[in-house]
Amino acid sequence: MRAEIDRVGIKIGMWLFLYSEIVLFGGLFVLYAAYFHKHPESFAVGGKELDRVIGAVNTVVLLVSSFTVAASITAIQKGSRKLTIGLLVFSITCGFVFLVNKYFEWGTKIHHDIYPNSETLVNGEPGLNIFFGLYYVITGLHGLHVIIGMILLSISLVLVLAGKIDGSRFSMLDNSGLYWHLVDLIWIFVFPLFYLVL
Amino acid sequence: MDNQDTGHILSYSQLAVVLVILLALTGVTVGVSYIHMGFFNVPVALAVACLKVTFVLLFFMHLKYEGRVIVLSFLSTITFLIIMIGFTFWDVAFR
């Protein structure tokens, strides 16, 4: 006799955690909205400092990786283990590409003396200081989520390789996938708010 | 026992169609951001973002095929989020 696996229960648990994440980022977006209302000109100037091309490339990278993660779940359900492994490796690589882009982006900003408590920001417009403060907090926290998502996908990959995840029990992969999609969801809002304002 | 409802499998082509829609909408937001409409850029950008998020939630995150518990709890979270963002912003904007 083997114990029944409560897949629905496992999924509800994951969603409850995702709700807390949604509210966490929701709180940060409230801050953004309130300060945008107070300093619209500075936010427009700040937004123009950010590179739209890198932002757009990162959006595409995350969307494609979300697709490959969703496809990997279809693949494991259909029993094509090799395809699952390939799609997961590709998705983790996408996460890595995203982080490398972010590294260059932050690096350029820091090189131009734009970072929390830098001379330019402290002595400049207060609105600009708030814009870049929010930029570093929100993209930083999002970047942390990308790293956690990559770790979860890697654990799933190892479990697929070890044969612990297969077509009949794949909740770990399913939940890692949900987390990865959440990372994508948050970026879908971060991208227009920071890169495309006015 | 009532695990049957998790059996739905999305096909690769369905997922690919969703990806194409998402990429097209990304193109739309980037394109629209070059047209200067003053304040109206913000609601347009947010509307496209909401549309994209809806596609990700329904298909990639499988929400369209989930049971009542997950759908209702998700909608409650979004309602709470709207109240939190809406009322806070209302206070800030019309104080």
Image: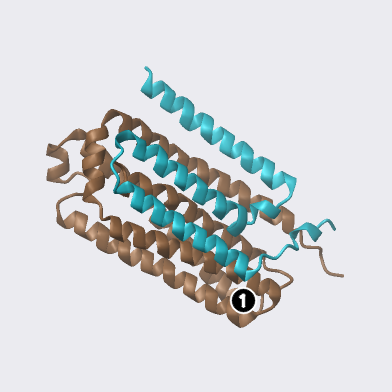
Chain colours: A brown, B cyan
Residue lying at 53% horizontally and 79% vertically, measured from the top left: A86
What kind of residue is marked 1? Val
Q: Quadrant of residue A127?
A: top left
Relative side of A29 to A155, left or right: left
Q: Is residue B52 above or below residue A163?
A: above
- Residue A107, by quadrant, is bottom left
Residue A188 seen anywhere in this rendered image of the structure: yes
Task: Reply above or below: A195 against A100.
Answer: above
Quarter holding residue A100: bottom left
In screen coordinates, is A46 left or right of A140? left
Residue B37: x and y in percent read 31, 38
What residue is disc 1 on? Answer: A160
Residue sitting at x 40%, y 44%? B45
Mark 1 neighbour density, 10 Å: few (under 14) some (14–19) many (20 or more):
many
Left or right: A125 in relation to A96: left
Residue drawn 54% across and 44% down?
A20
Relative vertical location of residue B82 with respect to residue B47 in this rendering, above or below: above
Q: Position of residue A23 (x, y in %)?
A: 51, 40
Chain of the residue displaying label 1: A
Residue extending furthest bottom? A82
Q: Count up the numbered dots.
A: 1
- Residue B42 shown left or right of residue B77 in the figure: left
Which corner quadrant holds the N terminus of chain A? bottom right
Q: Secondary structure at mark 1?
A: helix
Place of residue A146 in the rendered image (x, y in percent of width and height, measured from the top left) = 44, 60
Q: Of residues A144 and A45, which is closer to you in this image?
A: A45
Q: Residue furthest top?
A: B95
Task: Pick the quarter of the image with the C terminus of chain A.
Answer: top left
- Which residue is depicted at the point 27% across and 33% down? A40
- Residue A21, percent across and down? 51, 46
Q: Is residue A162 in view from this perspective? A: no
